[in-house]
Image: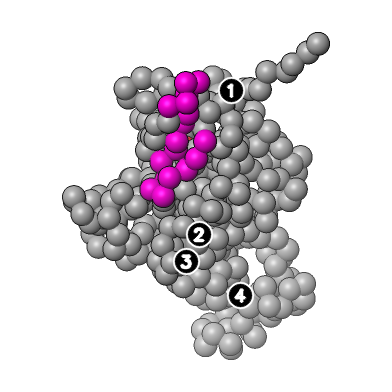
Amino acid sequence: MHWKILQLLKNRSPAYLSGEEAAGLLAVSRTAVWKNIKLLQKKGYRIESSTRRGYRLLESPDLLYPAEISEHLATSLIAAAPSLIKHHAQVGSTNTILKELAEDGAPEGTVALAEEQKQGKGRLGRSWASPFAKGLWLSILLRPAVAPQEAQNLTLLSATATAKAIAKTAPPLQPGIKWPNDLLLKGRKCCGILTELKAEADLLHYIIIGVGINVNADKKDFPEELRESATSLSLESGGVVPRVKLCSAVLQELDDSYREFLLHGPEPALEEWKRWNITLGKRVTLKTMSGIFAGTAVDLEKNGALVIEDDFGHQQSFLAGEVSLIPERKITN
Ligand code: BTN
């Protein structure tokens, strides 16, 4: 009911909506309208009330309420209905709660969002700082009927979709993708993606794509050891970035790319990834479980593996690991 009243207020804004008119339109009492206005105010909406004129919406909070996000979406799979968006003020990890929902049979396209994560998970067993309303902490459940080996391509696809969403929402920012899925701005990380999956030998049961974007975080919001290497969209753009708009853009871009992947396979997504990447052609080191490899990143294989060529011209491809970009040496005379 309160979302319906909010919609009426938005449609009427900046003018007033009388309690009597709202009650008539929704076939409820004026007291019910008043109670729901109070609820909206508690949720952070600034609504002015005047005994003579009624109610007027002054400002909406930039919180990730499903009704707000759905308003900007035209998706057909991901978050295709507001009921597929599970919003939480605080959770341990959105990936963990979405995994529980997936095990209970949640449909493809279910999205878990949190304003704050207390146990945000990063890649390689690390933690991910996720302070209240400072970023986007979201996870998306997909159930493509593909082999588990395709998972890497979905990870790359998610990185590209997220980079595009950031570029659209917060111009002139243009994130670059460090293989496989870190987004960097001026060499500092603003976004990470953690994909987790359940599969058997030939079949992927489900994949959870966990996206963490530092949106309006300040330096002090990052753990001390990351203050040099991490950044946020607001730090780089110099202004507050609207999270609801960004979240909708991420879901929309993901939906578009994922549908293309289902229709045409991974090639279009791999080509797009190449356009946004900042790894190919660079000198890199790659830290893997079996050691550290150094060389030049020369190609991306069809399965999303990174091909590295060492100084003797030997090429090796890797599906996992952590890339460090080696800064180019300046040649001076
Ligand atoms: C990385 O280490 O680069 C990956 C970070 C992924 C963080 C996101 S935030 C939403 C989702 N839930 C988590 O616990 N982690 C991912």
Identity of the residue furthest to the right in this view: 333
Give the image location of residue 209, x and y in percent. Answer: 41, 50
Label 4 sits on residue: 7
The residue depicted at 56 percent of the width and 20 percent of the height is: 224
Q: Nearer the viewer, mark 4 or mark 3?
A: 3
Q: Residue furthest left?
A: 201
| Whether label 4 touches label 3, CB < 8 Å | no
Tag 4: Cα neighbours inside 10 Å, few (<14), some, or many (≥20)? some
Q: Describe the element under mark 4 as helix, strand or loop.
A: helix
Horizontal side of residue 75 vs 215, given as left or right: left
> Which residue in the structure is indicated by mark 3?
260
CB at mark 1 closer than 8 A to ligand 1?
Answer: no
Mark 4 / mark 3, whichever is N-terminal: 4
Q: Is residue 61 left or right of residue 78?
A: right
The relative height of residue 222 versus residue 133 in the rendered view (above or below) is above
Determine the CA span between mark 4 and mark 3.
Answer: 33 Å
In the depicted view, which residue is nearer to us: 233 or 161? 161
Residue topped by disc 2? 268
Please say whether residue 319 is visible from this viewpoint: yes
Three-letter residue code for mark 3: Glu
Q: Earlier in the sequence, mark 2 or mark 3?
A: 3
Residue displayed at 73% across by 73% down:
13
Give residue 33's position: percent from left, percent from top: 56, 75
Residue 62, by quadrant, is: bottom right
Q: Which mark is residue 63?
A: none
- Residue 222 point in image, percent of width and height: 57, 28
Q: Position of residue 64 (x, y in %)?
A: 54, 56
